[in-house]
Amino acid sequence: MSGSRREFLKAGGVALAGLWLVPGREGAAVALSMPRTWPALEVIEMRSDALGTQVWFDPIGLFVRPGTTVRWIVRQNVHTATAYHPRNDHHALRIPTGATPWDSRFLVNPGDHFEVTLTVPGVYDYYCAPHEAVGMVGRIIVGQPGGPGAEPFGYWKGKAGTRDWRDVPDAARTAFPGIARIMSEHHVRVDGRRE
Ligand SMILES: [Cu+2]
């Protein structure tokens, strides 16, 4: 906590819903802009144990403000970061309708990285192409939940134009952190994994 914020709290200020409320002379609250900064860049590591039997994104769940750049970087093994979108090998649409899909292609060496800047609010689900079947997926919420990524996995079944879409594999379905947890924790990490 910064010195100024500590002093401020001692003086009776209360932080609430992104605003600083200051008791005014008549007891009315005066709203000031909150001295909080959001990172312009968030980093997601692409991880693996030594045998490659466990693979994961760290964090697996992330909340960012619109306009944030997200960078995926390889620490071990070989991975991709690929948006759930029909343009990516017929995967089901699980990013906002107006958002641009991405595919990092194979990131092979430790330190290799790829980044996108996310501006459209909503839920973005993505996967690692070689490891999707074993549950290497991640979820980013930009601004607020919404869009196809907030829908149940089979929401598109029977709708026009979806006949060649692929189901999300079972191991991936169970790996996604819930929207409520991401909204509350902002950075959700996979429990119990060790390199
Ligand atoms: Cu992978």
Image: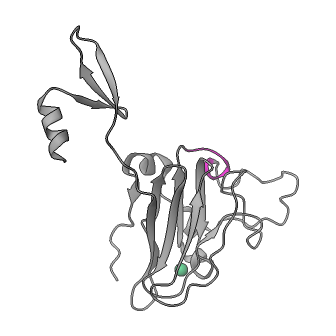
Quarter of the image containing the C terminus? bottom left
Q: Is residue 85 visible?
A: yes
Tell me if I can see residue 175 in this picture.
Answer: no
Query: x, y percentage for residue 107?
Result: 56, 84
Q: Closer to the camera, 177 or 38?
A: 38
Q: In x, y percent, where is residue 181?
A: 42, 49
**Farthest right residue?**
160
Number of marks in picture: 0
Left or right: residue 142 compared with residue 54: right
- Give the left or right position of residue 182, taking residue 26 as reference: right
Image-quadrant location for residue 133: bottom right
Q: Position of residue 154 (x, y in %)?
A: 70, 54
Q: Residue at the spot x=54%, y=43% of the render?
A: 144
Relative to 173, is 36 above or below?
Answer: above
Residue beneath the point at 55% across and 82% down: 79
Question: Magenta part of the protein: which range?
Answer: 145-150
Which of the 4 image quarters holds residue 188? bottom left
| In the image, residue 12 above or below residue 56 | above
- Nearest the eye: 154 or 28: 28
Q: Is residue 36 magenta?
A: no
What is the image's colouring? one colour
Residue 147 in the figure: left or right of residue 174:
right
Give whichever of 92, 11 is nearer the camera. Answer: 11
Q: Estimate the x, y position of residue 51 in percent, counting from the top left.
A: 42, 92
Say left or right for 86 vs 181: right
